[in-house]
Image: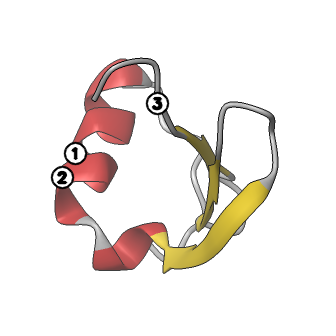
Amino acid sequence: MGTTFVDVVTCFGCRQLMFLDAKNNLIADAGFLDGFPVMQDIAKSTFPEGGFNQGW
């Protein structure tokens, strides 16, 4: 989408997600990683040693 991008900030301790725009402004409190199974799979494959919230 041109020069538009969004960063997703993920806390693996509490599993919360936040979307930030190109200027680091909060776009939305996206909820929790549990509701995004693809993101959860990426996190587990990127950090195979775990250490995540025990709710997983």
Q: Which residue is mark 3?
A: 4
Does dot 2 land on a helix, a strand or a loop?
Answer: helix
Report if the CB atoms under discs 1 and 2 are less than 8 Å apart: yes
N-terminal-most mark, 3 or 2: 3
Q: Nearer the viewer, residue 2 or 11?
A: 2
**Viewer-nearest of labels 3 and 1?**
3
Report the amino acid beneath label 1. Answer: Asp
Q: Which residue is mark 2?
A: 38
Number of callouts: 3
Q: CA distance from mark 3 to mark 1?
A: 25 Å
Q: Nearer the viewer, residue 1 or 29?
A: 1
Does dot 1 land on a helix, a strand or a loop?
Answer: helix
Horizontal side of 23 relative to 35 (left or right) equals: right
Horizontal side of 45 relative to 9 (left or right) equals: left
Asked if 25 appears above or below 53 in the picture, the reply is: above
Does dot 3 land on a helix, a strand or a loop?
Answer: loop
Q: CA distance from mark 1 to mark 2?
A: 5 Å
Q: Which residue is mark 1?
A: 41
Report if the CB atoms under discs 3 and 2 are less than 8 Å apart: no
The residue sitting at 38% across, 38% down in the picture is: 43
Q: Position of residue 12 (x, y in %)?
A: 63, 51
Q: Residues within 10 Å of mark 1 (few under 14, many from 20)?
A: few
The residue sitting at 59% across, 65% down in the picture is: 15
Horizontal side of 55 relative to 26 (left or right) equals: left
Report the amino acid beneath label 3. Answer: Thr
The residue sitting at 76% across, 60% down in the picture is: 26
